[in-house]
Image: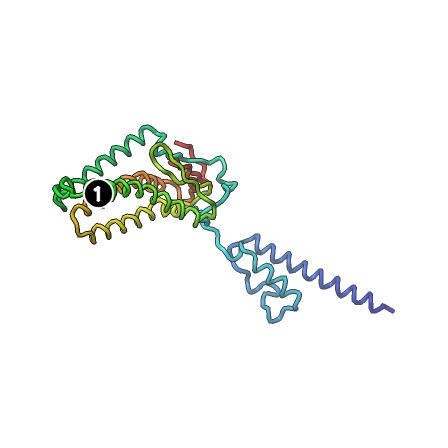
């Protein structure tokens, strides 16, 4: 005579063996093609005919993120990373130094000077130069001009710091490098996010200055706003250059912004220029 306890143990062992068999079949299918969904021909795939224990195993397997998210080819799926991924370590492909590189610094200053001359020439076509030279209250107007020029550089980098914090959650650092204020962050951003951080604050400030220019009735005030706008464009040239350089690099780059220096990493091994 077989006791009821023995029968219960045998049935329990049988269920465990069935579950292990189901797991091994699912694992084989997953290893064969982890980007496809489970086939309907899989034993037990039709949940209507599954015992409750097999249903739970099936749901656990289906909830694996790798089965639901297709891998991205040649791109990173993150906007920001607190630490550099393992596949990127040791693969720095570029270092963009806006101020430390003498050649690049001279090139950017030359472009800034040409831009300033063109902007002043355009201002003379839009407004009479006499409105700037014949100020009725020169001290107040010059004070407003100096304050506006200083505010532009601070607002640009403050805006970049805010976006760095929003995208990464890591507190940025504002510091002076020479005569310029720069925002830096220890996080690593993908190409699109870094371009947004560089360009969006400048676009917002440009739109605000254009609105002020159009609504200012006094020609002297228009000139002051135009000069502040010129300074803002000149400050943005380095950011525009860096954003264009990022576009020429591989799609999967991660960028760390340390003051006026951009460290660029990629999962693809390339010699650093």
Instruction: Decide if residue 236 is on the left or right side of residue 8.
Output: left
Residue 229 picture location, percent across and down: 24, 44
> On the image, which quarter does residue 146 sit in?
top left
Under tag 1, what secondary structure?
Answer: helix
113 in relation to 205, above or below: above
In this view, the residue in front, 273 or 23, is 273
Judging depth in this view, the residue of 24 and 149 nearest the camera is 149
Q: Residues within 10 Å of mark 1 (few under 14, many from 20)?
A: some
Residue 187: x %, y % from top left: 46, 43
Instruction: Name the foreground residue: 88 vs 99.
Output: 99
**What is the residue that sits farthest to the bottom in this orientation?**
48
- The residue to which callout 1 is attached is 141
Residue 218 in sight from this viewpoint: yes
Q: Residue at x 52, y 60 (%)?
A: 37
Q: Residue at x 55, y 60 (%)?
A: 38
Q: Taking the image as drawn, is residue 73 in sight? A: no
Above or below, 23 relative to 186 = below
Residue 26 image position (x, y, % from top left): 60, 58
Q: Residue at x 25, y 49 (%)?
A: 209
Quadrant containing the C terminus in the rendered view: top left
């Amino acid at each position: 005579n077989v006791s009821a306890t023995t029968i219960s143990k045998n049935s329990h062992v049988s269920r465990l063996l069935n579950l292990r068999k189901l797991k091994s079949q699912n694992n084989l299918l997953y290893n064969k093609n982890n980007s496809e969904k489970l086939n309907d021909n899989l034993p037990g795939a039709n949940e209507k005919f599954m015992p409750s224990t097999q249903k739970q195993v099936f749901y656990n397997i289906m909830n694996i993120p790798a089965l639901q998210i297709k891998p991205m080819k040649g791109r990173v799926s993150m906007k920001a990373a607190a630490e550099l991924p393992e596949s990127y370590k040791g693969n720095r492909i570029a270092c963009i130094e806006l101020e430390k590189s003498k050649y690049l610094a001279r090139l950017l200053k030359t472009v800034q000077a040409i831009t300033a001359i063109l902007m002043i020439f355009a201002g003379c076509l839009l407004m009479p130069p006499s409105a700037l030279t014949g100020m009725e209250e020169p001290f107040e107007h010059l004070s407003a001009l100096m304050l506006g020029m200083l505010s532009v550089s601070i607002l640009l980098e403050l805006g970049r710091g805010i976006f760095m914090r929003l995208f990464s959650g890591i507190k940025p650092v504002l510091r002076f490098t020479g005569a310029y204020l720069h925002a830096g962050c220890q996080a690593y951003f993908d190409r699109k996010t870094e371009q947004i951080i560089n360009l969006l604050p400048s676009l917002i400030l440009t739109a605000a200055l254009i609105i002020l220019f159009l609504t200012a009735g006094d020609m002297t005030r228009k000139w002051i706003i135009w000069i502040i706008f010129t300074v803002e464009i000149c400050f943005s040239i380095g950011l525009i250059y860096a954003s264009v350089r990022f576009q020429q690099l591989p799609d999967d780059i991660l960028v760390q912004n340390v003051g006026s220096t951009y460290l660029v990493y990629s999962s693809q091994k390339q010699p650093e220029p």
